[in-house]
Amino acid sequence: MRNVTVLAGGVGGARFTRGLLAHLATAAPDAAVTVIVNTGDDLWLDGLRICPDLDTVMYTLGGGINEEQGWGRPEETRRASSEIAAYGRGWSWFTLGDLDLATHIVRTDLLRSGSTLSEATEFLCRRWQPGVRLLPMSDHPIETHVCLAENIDEHAAGDYIHFEEWWVRYRARVAVTGFEQRGPADAVAAPGVLEAIQTADLIVLPPSNPVVSIGTILAVPGVRAALRSTTARVVGVSPIIGGAAVRGMADACLHTIGVETSALAVGLHYGSRSQGGVLDAWLVDETDAAALPALAAAGIRSAAAPLWMTDLPTTTAIAAAVLAL
Ligand code: FO1
């Protein structure tokens, strides 16, 4: 087990990877882990480039995460963002803490000086030392926008708003008719991304949001094809336990694309590599063990294990179950 590649979104992907690193430290000490991170949540705000999922993975693995929130820094203050609000600027409902702002300022400074997002991320990781190679899915901006199905506040049905406004301001409780990736037509995978998929021994799809996190990465040109052709084993971990999203509002996203909120439905949505999909195996929670025969019938090896990531030992055990599968 030399090279492990993880396709990750924010909180779920970061917490899983922390457990994976803990497990590999004893199970395969010389393994190298690459995390390919969703950048569909990224946005320009107050003149700064915000990269929520890259920062959540970097802070979580680097020991700087606000553990309860799963994003941002602990012991935060909001002096600068309160001043921005006093000018009537910014998003009052989107917290940019003073410590977190330093990350966005340094990243934006690097980008404006000509660095790619990959280079800026590598620079920030020199401080945080996450213990993995952290790659944005693309160096091009590919932002997720959602189409509103109803009028709300200053928005009308049919309007598109940035995913973060839907997610944070409206808590995904406003009906949307679909998601759109907004990026240049020539957007490509970031350097090293396709290679990290093609040269891995194991690829893991952690319990991140299958639509707006993993799905966004799969939509990057070449990623799906690389997953389907790699000699690596591709193992996914269900983000749905007992018919409910573990965290976040994955059920709202799945509903929008017409996928039932169940471990089975998400596994079939990703699909078996033998039938045009991207999975070799799918790990479900013990409460969803009834799905195993249907998954097997669809060509997906599967197993049931406790999937609640309550602390490091439980996430380490999940990583062990993934490697066993
Ligand atoms: N999530 C919230 O629920 N409320 C916030 O105010 C908020 C601010 C924020 C600032 C920077 C950042 O990197 C992430 C932030 N998040 C916030 C989390 C973010 O919405 C999620 O981490 C991902 O976009 C979805 O996984």
Image (cartoon, rainbow, N blue to C red):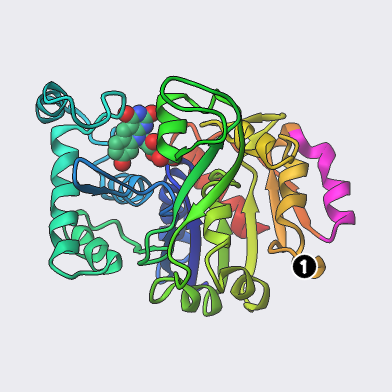
Q: Position of residue 117 (x, y in %)?
A: 28, 64
Q: Position of residue 63 (x, y in %)?
A: 26, 44
Predominant SS of the magenta segment: helix
**Quarter assignment of residue 45:** top left
Check residue 113 for magenta coloring. no
**Which of 1 and 259 lies nearest the eye of the viewer?**
259
Above or below, 209 relative to 181: above
In the figure, is residue 285 to the left or right of 216? right
**Which of 234 and 159 lies nearest the eye of the viewer?**
159
**Which of 299 and 170 lies nearest the eye of the viewer?**
170
Q: Is residue 140 visible?
A: yes
Above or below, 133 relative to 75: below
Looking at the rendered structure, the kind of residue marked 1 is Gly
Q: Position of residue 289 (x, y in %)?
A: 79, 38
In the figure, is residue 123 to the left or right of 216? left
Above or below, 30 relative to 55: below
Give the residue drawn at x 56%, y 70%: 223
Quick check: is the Cβ at mark 1 less than 8 Å away from ligand 1?
no
Give the residue drawn at x 85%, y 55%: 296
Give the residue drawn at x 17%, y 25%: 88
Q: Quadrant of ligand 1?
A: top left
**Quarter assignment of residue 60:** top left
Q: Which residue in the structure is indicated by mark 1?
A: 276
Give the residue drawn at x 79%, y 58%: 300
Q: Circle 1 sits in a helix, a strand or a loop, which is it?
A: loop
In the figure, is residue 92 to the left or right of 109? right
Q: What span is in magenta?
A: 288-299
For label 1, the crowd category at 10 Å Cα-Cα, with few meaning under 14, some 14 to 19 and many 20 or more, is few
Q: Position of residue 42 (x, y in %)?
A: 36, 49
